[in-house]
Image (cartoon, grey):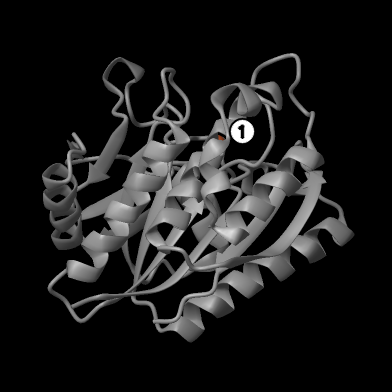
Amino acid sequence: MAQLVAAMASVHVPLLTSAPHMANAAMWEKIHHGFDTLRETLTTSGADTLVVISDEHFNALDPRRYPSFGVVTADSGVGPVENWLGMPSNSIKVRFTPDLAETVLREGVSQGFDLTRLSEAGLEHGFLTVLNFLTPKWDMNYLWLIQNCVLPPLPSVKRCYEFGRMVGRAIRQWDSNRRVAVIGTGGLSHAVGTPDMGKVDPKFDAKFLKRLCANSPSLLKITDAEMEAVGNGTHEIRNWVAVAGAAEGAKGEVVMYEPMMAVGFGMMRFQMSA
Ligand SMILES: [Fe+2]
C-alpha cells in the first residue's frame, strides 16, 4: 500500500511570480527559507507523488458549475491558464495520477462525500505558485483536489477536516508502492477585491496556526464569521485544515510567517512518522 510520508501547507500568493518586485531582498530571504525547508522535507520523505489541495479562482472552472469538493481525474494538466501570472501561458505540463484520483473518488463516495469528477482542469495559481518553488522541474506525479473556498455557501471547516481525513485514508489504502505527500495551499488572512484588500490580521493567523499545529479539536471551532472578519481570502485556510485531517493527529510546526505582500504569509509542515 502507498504511504503518506509528508504533509504541509503554504500560501499561494500569485504576486510571487506575477510581481516578484513586491518583495524586497529581506522578504525574499524569508520566502526562500520557507520554500527551501518545505522542499527539503519533500526530498527527505522520498515522496514521488504530490497531492495538492486548493481552491480554484474561476480561471479554469466555471462558477456556474463549481463543486464543493472536486477530484481532477485527468492524465495530465497544462497551465497557467492565467496570462498575468508571470509564467508563459500554458508553458507547464504536469503528469497527474488518475489511479489515485479514482481511489479518492471511490473512498470519498463510500464515506458520504458527493465528490465531483473533473476530467479536465487547466492549471492556475492555486496549484502552480507553490509548486513553482517546491518542484521547479515539475517532475513528480501530481493529484489536484479542489475545495470550494470562494463561492458561498462554503463547506464547513469540520467538513474540510473530514474531507482531508478521507483523503489520507484513500492514500494509505491505495494499492501502490508510491510515497505520497500532501500540501494545502491558500490563505492565511487576506482580502481580495474588497475595501479591506491589503489588510492582514497576524493575531488571527497566530491563533489559527497554533490550533493547526496542535491538530486539536479546537481547530474545528473556527467559524465562517471569524474568517470573513479578517478578509474573504481567509476562507482558504480550509485547505490547511484538510491537510491536518489527512495527517491524522500529527503535530505540526510553523516554517515561516510574516505579514507581507498583502497576506499573512505563512508555511508549515506536520511531523509525519511514516
Ligand atoms: Fe487564493
Which residue is located at x 46 percent, y 36 percent? 157
Secondary-structure class at tag 1: helix
- Image quarter of the N terminus: bottom left
When asked about the image quadrant of residue 28, the answer is: bottom right
Which residue is located at x 54 percent, y 77 percent? 41
- Image quarter of the C terminus: bottom left
Relative image position of residue 55 (x, y in whole percent)? 43, 37
154 or 35, which lies in front?
154
Q: How many numbered marks have been drawn onto this rendered protein structure?
A: 1
Relative image position of residue 113 (x, y in whole percent)? 21, 38
144 or 206, which lies in front?
206
Which residue is located at x 66 percent, y 46 percent? 208
When asked about the image quadrant of residue 31, the answer is: bottom right
Q: Is residue 53 left or right of residue 252?
A: left
238 or 33, which lies in front?
238
19 or 111, which lies in front?
111
Which residue is located at x 78 percent, y 29 percent? 198
The image shows residue 121, relative to residue 153, as above or below, that is: below
Residue sticking out furthest to the front: 217
According to the picture, the residue beneath numbered tag 1 turns out to be: 234
Relative image position of residue 222 (x, y in whole percent)? 58, 35
The image shows residue 5, relative to residue 17, as above or below, that is: below
Three-letter amino acid code at disc 1?
Thr
Q: Residues within 10 Å of mark 1 (few under 14, many from 20)?
A: many
Q: Is residue 158 left or right of residue 174?
A: right
The image shows residue 160, relative to residue 270, as above or below, that is: above
